């Protein structure tokens, strides 16, 4: 806060003192939030790492199964079975709060479809095609969960960055400037008081001389 | 379906299929192919009896799809050629067996139409290896609605389609009920039309009943892995199996685990062939391959025991189909980077 803009009055001093107190308490809370978010981030990061491994494993398994289905039954049969599918995967999107920050919550509503409701016939449907379909359904569930965890992690990172900037701003800019302004007002008020005392002494001397 | 008079030209057709069988690829050829790259496989099969089809399709299709389409096209031509050369009751039996491919084509058409695929792309996936030739399949393909396709197919194959099946399909929009209806009807009708008093027909009936066993067992095991048991399984069972009758099928359908089902199967003659594959590892890959091997082993045995019957013809058709499958397994397996050992396990040799 530039000193030229400060009105050195008692009320301004009180206002500045109030703001210093508020900023310090805000700084303390922000610091706690930042630390809390970092702890939360590490927990989510562990989960995300596991989810990434799961995605890789399930993806590998699904690709292996579809490769086998395409080899044994032929790409034409696999394509034909895929054409018959009627089920649409459905997810439910919600949100939950982590330290006041909203993160997405994704729930798989309809992803796994029983073989009898997939759309194609049960008799004569190859076990390879069915195993591939199941493997891809499993992969989809894992992907949905991974998407939730990854988004949470990204949001947490953004929020940590934002909180860190706020903490730094409070610590290195707002609080020091307010303290400087408070010191300036106090100094000016003391100066004004001294000027007043001298002025009063001058007036007293003049009135005594008269 | 079984309207031709006379026993049929067994000697001539069997002699022809035996000559054709001699030109089928043997185990050592598959071992060699496993060592080849995809372009080498394409070149190799172009020089091994699939030349005409490879050249015909090369302008439109490329890569691994060319191998798959060309081998299917070749198989369709070979089967049609065999069918044309048969007469009498032999023709009836071969033709009845090849109806399987008509059902395959019906499924491809209905599924493609349901998805909204264009006519050309559906046509590309058809395998005219059955009774219905390309003209008839084109006719089915050109029909507007699924209902019309089902009814026309019923007329072509002399299969009555009850209105409730069509209505259930149009109401639910799921093809499953229609497909299952036709699959069941194919086998039940076939069995009802075979008069076991004639030797060749009895053999054919026996063959079909064993095939029903294979299909039913695979259905039971797939559904078991899905957690479906009891009556929900029984509605997909085709009646008329040779070894797996209704009682055993119910027992198998009710078994809670694959191991429990394996105990119930221990009395059957193919148990030794499949027992190693009946594990709870979540995959039926090895079981399917073992059942196919058992099936061809059986036809091989019967074709030598009854050389002048329909069995040598069926044996050749199954082996030709397996050759096409094996070529595709090797080519697609290599293309997808599946390890050689897994490819070997998938091959039916």
Image (cartoon, coloured by chain):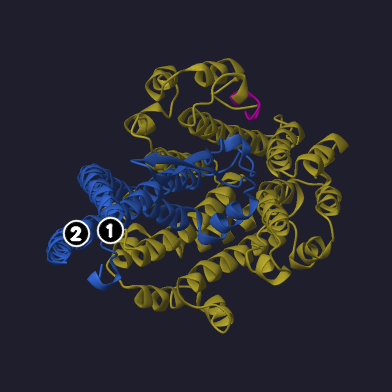
Q: Nearer the viewer, residue A45 or A49?
A: A45
Q: Nearer the viewer, residue A56 or B7?
A: A56
Q: Position of residue B235 (x, y in %)?
A: 66, 26
Magenta span covers which residues? Answer: B233-239
Q: Residue at x 56, y 46 (%)?
A: A89
Q: Which chain is blue?
A: A
Q: Quadrant of residue A9?
A: bottom left
Evaluate whether residue A160 shows in this view. no
Q: Position of residue A155 (x, y in %)?
A: 35, 53
The answer to whether residue B126 is left or right of residue A55 is right
The answer to whether residue A138 is left or right of residue A8 is right
In the rendered image of the structure, the colour used to display chain B is yellow
Q: Residues within 10 Å of mark 1 (few under 14, many from 20)?
A: some
Q: Secondary structure at mark 2?
A: helix
Q: Residue at x 38, y 52 (%)?
A: A151
The answer to whether residue B146 is left or right of residue B232 is right
């Amino acid at each position: 806060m530039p000193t030229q803009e400060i009105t050195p009055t008692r009320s301004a001093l009180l206002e500045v003192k109030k703001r210093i107190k508020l900023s310090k308490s805000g700084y303390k809370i922000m610091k706690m939030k930042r630390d809390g978010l970092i702890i939360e981030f590490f927990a989510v990061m562990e989960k995300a790492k596991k989810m990434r491994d799961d995605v890789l494993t399930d993806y590998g398994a699904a690709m292996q199964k579809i490769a086998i289905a395409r080899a044994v039954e032929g790409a034409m049969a696999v394509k034909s079975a895929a054409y018959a599918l009627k089920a649409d995967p459905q997810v439910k999107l919600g949100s939950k709060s982590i330290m006041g920050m909203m993160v997405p919550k994704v729930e798989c509503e309809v992803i796994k479809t029983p073989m009898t409701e997939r759309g194609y016939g049960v008799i004569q449907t190859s076990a390879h095609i069915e195993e591939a379909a199941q493997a891809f359904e499993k992969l989809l569930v894992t992907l949905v969960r991974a998407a939730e965890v990854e988004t949470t992690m990204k949001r947490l990172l953004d929020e940590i960055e934002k909180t860190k900037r706020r903490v730094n701003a409070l610590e290195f800019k707002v609080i020091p400037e307010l303290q400087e302004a408070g010191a300036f007002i106090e100094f000016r008020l003391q100066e004004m008081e001294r000027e007043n005392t001298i002025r009063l002494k001058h007036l007293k001397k003049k009135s005594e001389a008269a | 379906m079984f309207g031709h008079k006379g026993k049929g030209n067994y000697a001539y057709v069997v002699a022809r299929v035996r000559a054709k069988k001699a030109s089928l690829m043997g185990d050592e050829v598959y071992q060699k192919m496993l060592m080849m790259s995809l372009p080498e496989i394409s070149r190799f099969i172009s020089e091994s009896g699939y030349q005409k089809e490879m050249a015909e399709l090369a302008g439109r299709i490329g890569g691994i799809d060319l191998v798959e389409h060309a081998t299917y096209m070749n198989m369709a031509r070979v089967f049609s050629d065999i069918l044309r050369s048969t007469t009498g009751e032999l023709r009836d039996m071969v033709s009845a067996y090849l109806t399987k491919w008509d059902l395959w084509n019906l499924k491809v058409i209905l599924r493609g139409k349901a998805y909204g695929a264009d006519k050309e792309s559906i046509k590309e996936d058809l395998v005219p290896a059955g009774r219905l030739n390309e003209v008839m399949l084109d006719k089915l393909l050109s029909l507007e609605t699924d209902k019309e396709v089902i009814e026309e197919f019923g007329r072509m194959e002399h299969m009555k389609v009850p209105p409730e099946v069509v209505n259930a399909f149009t109401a639910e929009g799921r093809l499953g009920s229609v497909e299952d209806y036709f699959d069941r009807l194919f086998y039940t009708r076939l069995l009802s039309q075979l008069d076991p008093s004639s030797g060749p027909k009895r053999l054919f009936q026996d063959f079909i009943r064993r095939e029903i066993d294979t299909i039913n067992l695979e259905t039971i095991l797939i559904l078991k892995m899905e957690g479906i048991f009891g009556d929900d399984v029984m509605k997909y069972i085709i009646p008329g199996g040779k070894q797996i009758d209704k009682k055993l099928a119910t027992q198998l359908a009710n078994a809670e685990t694959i191991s429990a089902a394996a105990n119930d199967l221990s009395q059957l003659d193919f148990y030794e062939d499949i027992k190693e594959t009946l594990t709870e590892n979540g995959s039926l890959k090895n079981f399917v391959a073992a059942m196919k091997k058992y099936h061809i082993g059986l036809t091989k045995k019967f074709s030598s025991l009854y050389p002048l019957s329909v069995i040598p013809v069926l044996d050749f058709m199954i082996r030709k189909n397996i050759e096409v499958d094996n070529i595709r397994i090797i080519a697609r397996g290599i293309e997808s980077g599946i390890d050689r050992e897994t490819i070997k396990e998938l091959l039916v040799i």
